[in-house]
Amino acid sequence: MHPSPHGGAQGSHIPLDAFQNMPVGIIGALNALPQPGVELRGVNIPVELRINPAFSIEDWLVDYDPHIALVELHWYVHTHGALTLADTIRTTNPRTFIVMGGLTASAFPRDILERYSSVDMIIAGEAENGLLSLRDCFLKYSGRPEQVEHAWFRDESGKIIEPDRLVSMKSVEHLDHTSLSWLDNYDEFERSDFPYRNRWLLSGRGCGKTCFFCGGSRHSMETLYNRRSVLTRPPERVADDIIRLGRSGVQAVHLSHDIMTQGKEYWRPLFKRIRHSRIHVGLGNESWGPVPDSDLLHEWRATFDVEHSYIALSPTSAWSGLRRFASRRNEDEHLLESIDLLSRFNFPLHVFFLLNVPGETAETLERTLDVAWSIIKNYPTDLLRMEAQTASIDPCSPAALDVVPSISFQRPRFDDYLSVSRGQYIPALNWPERAEEIDPGDPIDVPRARPADLFKIGMKCPSLMKRWQELITSNTDA
């Protein structure tokens, strides 16, 4: 069950049908569960609300009446919504066993179990073995929770029991990463974010980067999942999944991991297998550092539907001194050379800047605006999507763990994420009107920021923020 972001909390600025995408790894884990006597059914509440704003999860629960409810709490924006959903399930279906999992649930299992009696169990870390043992627990062991791997739960006395250890998967090739037949209105889910059918596909697990804000970084993987290396799926198996999705009617596939990081020895056999299949599908790829070259772009155009493809670059800031906090190493000239190459190939391009990197000043934001304007002037407008994102601090990210070199963060608490998920913060688009002006060149005092302010750190120059929004909205399709 994929919750709405804030469960209808009063005062929230977040639409109920926002954040429709589900964690890409959950599909394979759930597809392993069905067997004789076990039925799987899923609901994505934001998608249902997009289809029908009057959708009632209470009616859905009464109709289906599940024995076990798996409530996803991966991204922290769903914290309040997931907990509200658990309370709703407990009210409408008192006998249902309610289980949570995902990044945020794995980061705060004790907080959740101590404060929310509706939640019976949390499966921490990578969920595959935990979910299989949960299924077998009810089929073979009459619901004895101690048989469930990776499980946090309460014993009969109310004491919270935590798992002995977490084990990361050595391979995920035995799992089906494409089928969504169990999800209500899955065809509408496949239209999230784009006006055509598109899907994210698991192409790896883990990360070697240390971006300060990211809950998928190396530090988070080690802390929450006991994953100490990146698991890369074989290119032929990834290609087979792309082919399967393309033949099902999906028009674009976005990979979870950057193929350019893997090099030519990875993407060439993947592309070759796709070409032999003769499917017509687009491919989305976000560069984690390496820039595209002409060989890649030539083969890409010969393999995929370029109209439904894109390459995403995330330079973060025009100042290289700030990029180190986001594991971005490319200098401006390399970025602009890559963009010039993509333009010559008439290739769809997504560019993402980050406006609240530690140390951001009016001067550095002015330089970023100059680079953004240079891209807009020189790139075909109909092929360009540019965004200025405001990074928040994910649970167990390097900033949340306070392991960012040369800067000290106060660790966010569970309550901070709960408040943010209720919408009790200043949205990025409202900063120009509601944030205070600061003197040009004056850095934000990140090391002294309070936990709740960690979601608002960064540039507080309304005039420059307004210029950025005007620049983006008037010159790109974003």
Image: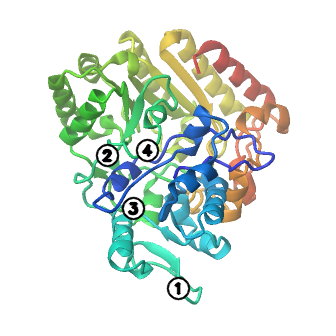
Q: Is label 4 in a helix, a strand or a loop? A: loop
Q: Is residue 98 above or below residue 475?
A: below
Q: Earlier in the sequence, mark 1 or mark 4?
A: 1
Q: Is residue 445 left or right of residue 254?
A: right
Q: Amino acid at mark 2?
A: His
Residue placed under numbered mark 3 in the picture: 126
Nearer to us in this view, 438 or 7: 7
Q: Residue furthest bottom?
A: 157
Q: Residue at x 26, y 38 (%)?
A: 241
Q: Amino acid at mark 4?
A: Leu
Q: Residue at x 59, y 21 (%)?
A: 478
Residue placed under numbered mark 1 in the picture: 155
- Count of numbered labels shown in the rendering: 4
In which quadrant of the rendered view does residue 55 lie?
top right
Q: Are marks 3 and 1 in contact (CB under 8 Å)?
A: no
Q: Earlier in the sequence, mark 3 or mark 2?
A: 3
Residue placed under numbered mark 2 in the picture: 177
